[in-house]
Amino acid sequence: MVSPSVKKEGFVIPRFGEVETKFAVSYLRVSTAKQTKESKTGLNRQERSWNQWIEDHPDYEGWNFKFQDLGISGRGKHQTKGALANYLDQAERGVIPAGTVLVADSPSRLTREKPKDALKLLLRIFDLGHKISFCSGQWRGEIIESDTHGVWSRLVAAAEQSAELWEERSNNSNEYHREKIERLNNGDLSVHFHARKNKKSKVFYPHWLDFDDEAKLFSFNENAVWMRQVFEWATQAGCTEIAKRLKGMGIRQKKNRKKPISRDLVRSWLIHRGAIGEFQPQKDGGEKAGEPIAGIFPPLIEPELFNKVQSRMKKRNRNNSEPQLTDQFRNLFTKSIFCRECGHPARFHQNKKPMKYDLDNVYHSYSCSAGYVDADEICICKKRFTSKKRGVDFELDVLKRLQTFRWAEFFTNEKLEKKLDSAHGKKMRLLAKLQEEERVVKNLKKAFDQYLFDGEKVPERHAELTKQAQKNYEETYQNYWSSKIEEDRLRHERRGKDAEKDIQNLLRKFLETGRNNLRQRQEFSRWFFETGLVVDIDLYTGAFDVGIGRRENGVLVEVDYQLEHRAMFIRDGFTFEDNDGNPLDMNHFIKQKRIEDSKSKEQKIKESWEMINNPKNVLLQKAIMQHLDQLPKNSSEARNIRANLKVA
């Protein structure tokens, strides 16, 4: 007679009477998520073994709750989380009664711990009054108790065998992954990627890309268009708002068209480093395995936008109060102010000096980043211009000058969209090239370290390859940043009068409330840099000009003041005339500037020097050569003049 049972905490346990019900508990485990698929034989085999065990032991009743660890390693994790940990907890609390048999397919399914730790687990089970049985191999479903004759020598041998098997498979897996990552670093994409068979097939690249199995190349698909928009939105909007916008556009989940895009899915896209062309190797559980590999995917966006989005997401996750103005943001024109003498960046300084009228007084000043540190071969200007003190406010002077700047002409462009698309395409091509060359440099450095580690002589050819690779990387890096600045400038070009009105409002509000607000200063500084404008300062006198600058290797090599200066003359009542005496307005000069901008650099240089070489301009020729003799031999200005002479 079998006594009835009662439920306790969701489990069936017996009422103890004349005859106790004997229970058996099934424990199934597979190490990886891949093995949980129905097509895999491991899980099915363990299910069959369990069913056969119950059939062979009719006096035992199967526990009505299955303990399954799917995708959990048999070493370490399974005793602290998951089904085995749950079983041990229920057994210790008496929910699963003493005398129950824990049934596993084999010792290696139960655990793959080191022999000492495996025996501790078995002792823990035996101490609870439970028994163990393994279905396969030499065990053949035998019910094992702690005092079974000869059991411990067999268990120790089984534990050693399981541990050795784990070590072997782990080493094989690690070696396979190392080889795969090595091939990816060398640009072999066939090792890990394949084309999608259907919308639901699993691939290891972002949903905005497709892979061609024959060409072994990635290409953007239709999702890339709105994914770029998602990153643009993310600089201002949160994941929930972006999900709503995508729903309004009719965009649904790819694997289930009935489901809208969720907030969590948007977040996973925004942190995916594939957006900047990087591939992040992962372990089976999704944990990162090493550093990202650059240059694997074509970049969807530039790293600056990606980093900006990550920063905004972190800020939204923190509820911080308004930050105070800190030292690093006192310089409003970071990366945009240059020494007039040599074109190198002007370095910002500040010194706190309490005064009677202002105990918190701080002096601000600028110096040439080359001349002030005695780099006489580049610049001889050692002057330090004080930009903020009592009666002097250089920042305010520049802001007022910006209010009179001819923004309407600066933001006018007849073929803006075409230019912008071309500039963006050029920038993204350079970014892809930059990532490829960065990978080459890293691989060469890794090879150098390996030579040293192995105690081998580094080949002479390696140094040549490294030097050339570094040179290629630096050149592409400079070209990338130049293309980015050009794209940013074009992106800010709007219809002239509308843009001028917006800029004037921005300047007015910043002058009224923004100069002492950290975030507004950050945004203004970033905006000013992105316009491509520069401040060209004479550090001896503090005189300055604002114009459109062209940088090379971080040095200012050209500034265009033409429109600004002519506009100032016209506002002051000065008139310009052509050769026939007809008055010329600003529209004439704007048209001329567009013609000049369309010319190549070489064409401009040749036309300038043809004019200088005219016999009528002998005095001008002498003045240029005298000026060249007075300049430091290796200064940027002298180098530019000699280069221009060579082209001319």
Image (cartoon, rainbow, N blue to C red):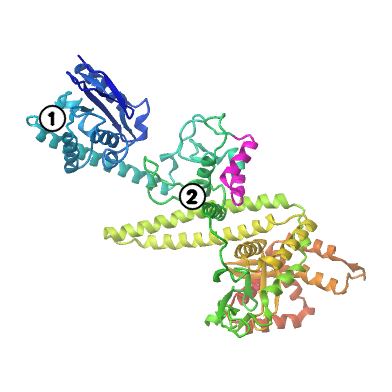
Q: Please provide the residue range marked out in magenta.
A: 228-251
Please state, as top left, top right, bottom left or bottom right, where the C terminus lies in the image. Answer: bottom right
Query: Is residue 592 found inside the magenta-colored segment of the image?
Result: no
Q: Which type of secondary structure does the marked residue at label 2 adopt?
A: loop
Residue at image position (45%, 46%) is: 279
Q: Where is residue 4, by image quadrant? A: top left
Q: For the view shown, which residue lies furthest in the right direction?
A: 581
Residue at image position (58%, 51%) is: 428
Q: Amino acid at mark 2?
A: Gly
Left or right: 178 as drawn, with respect to 292: left
- Percent position of residue 209, x then y: 53, 40
Image: 25 above or below 222: above
- Percent position of residue 142, x then y: 15, 24
Left or right: 151 as drawn, with respect to 403: left
Q: Nearer the viewer, residue 205 or 521?
A: 521
Is disc 1 in contact with disc 2, using a CB cutoff of under 8 Å?
no
Which comes before the other along the chain, label 1 or label 2? 1
Please state, as top left, top right, bottom left or bottom right, where the N terminus lies in the image. Answer: top left
- Name the magenta segment's main secondary structure: helix
- Percent position of residue 366, x then y: 60, 78
Image: 592 above or below 205: below
Image: 164 above or below 353: above
Is residue 17 visible from the viewing direction of this image? yes
Q: Amino acid at mark 1?
A: Glu
- Percent position of residue 568, x then y: 81, 72
**Residue holding disc 2:** 295
Left or right: 453 as drawn, with respect to 152: right
What's the CA distance linking mark 1 and mark 2?
A: 58 Å
Query: Is residue 243 found inside the magenta-colored segment of the image?
Result: yes
Is residue 65 visible from the viewing direction of this image? no
Please tell me the numbered disc located at residue 145: 1
